[in-house]
Amino acid sequence: MKIATKQIGQGSRQAALVHGIASSGTSWMEVAQILVDRYDYTVIMVDLRAHGESPNMKSYLIREFAQDLKDTLPKGLDLLMGHSLGGRIAAEAAAFLQPNKLICLDPGIRMKEIYKLKFIKNLPLFIRNRFPITPPETSTTMNTLIHESLSLWDSKMTSALLSEGVRLDFRALSPTMPATVILADNSFAVSKEKEHDLKLVGWSIRHKPGSVHEMHWQDPEGTVAMISDLLGNTQNLYTQDVTRN
């Protein structure tokens, strides 16, 4: 199924950004603008099924989310980047889409362990209570976009998605393109065991000091700085000491 997208920029390179659960493409807006202004990108921001302007569906399986990306995005992107659930889905779709680079921000590959937690039956309520409490560094503009996204989210998708995550645990396969994971401090999305597995098969792992799971809301400048060497030449001089964040 083709899903809704928003596009900004008219750069010579093309990137697609995939959001996490209960969010939408607009949650990438500040990162996307940096890619447009400083790295000469055209940026596509997708709305996953049950999120943003994409339709609600009867089924929410991981393979269906990944197929939506395959149906919507062009092959051979210069960059495919996903956050949380979007990172997991981007990783699943990458072998088909064959981007030049794959970057996953704290990807949701620990679903089997998360499903065992006591609060998981009340995950929609947990998310709705947690999202309004964005990192204190989050800008006013981003706070508005995040709240708008949450209001459009179909929370019924969580049970099907997580139950499948238990049956089909994430397999750390050798990537067919340069692939990088950026981990938050004390990541709950990627266990130490999963991190080890990813390294063994050729993924590059980076840790962003002082970051939370939603690092691209908390610190869009520092998040981009973490991957600046993967993005190509900047249009303007840009430096950022990520250790301050």
Image (cartoon, rainbow, N blue to C red):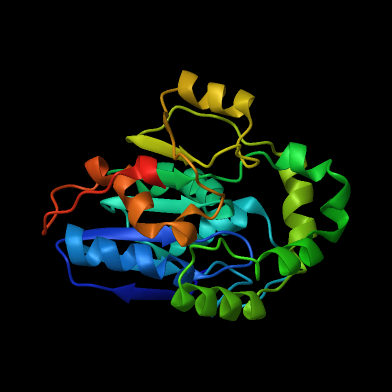
Q: Relative to 139, is 183 above or below?
A: above
The answer to which of 166 and 27 lies nearer the viewer is 27
Q: Position of residue 170 (x, y in %)?
A: 62, 36
Report the label total: 0
Q: Relative to 56, is 177 above or below?
A: above
| Residue occupying image coordinates x 63% and y 80% | 152
| Residue 2, visible in the rendered structure | no
Which of the 4 image quarters holds residue 73?
bottom left
Using residue 21 as the reference point, say whether residue 78 is left or right of it.
left
Which of the 4 image quarters holds residue 214?
bottom right
| Residue occupying image coordinates x 18% and y 61% | 38
Outermost residue to the top: 200
| Residue occupying image coordinates x 41% and y 60% | 17
Q: Position of residue 241 (x, y in %)?
A: 29, 44
| Residue 13, visible in the rendered structure | yes
Using residue 104 as the reference point, say whether residue 15 is left or right of it.
left
Q: Position of residue 187 (x, y in %)?
A: 60, 39
The answer to which of 151 and 5 lies nearer the viewer is 151
Using residue 116 as the reference point, say whether residue 198 is left or right of it.
left
| Residue occupying image coordinates x 47% and y 73% | 142
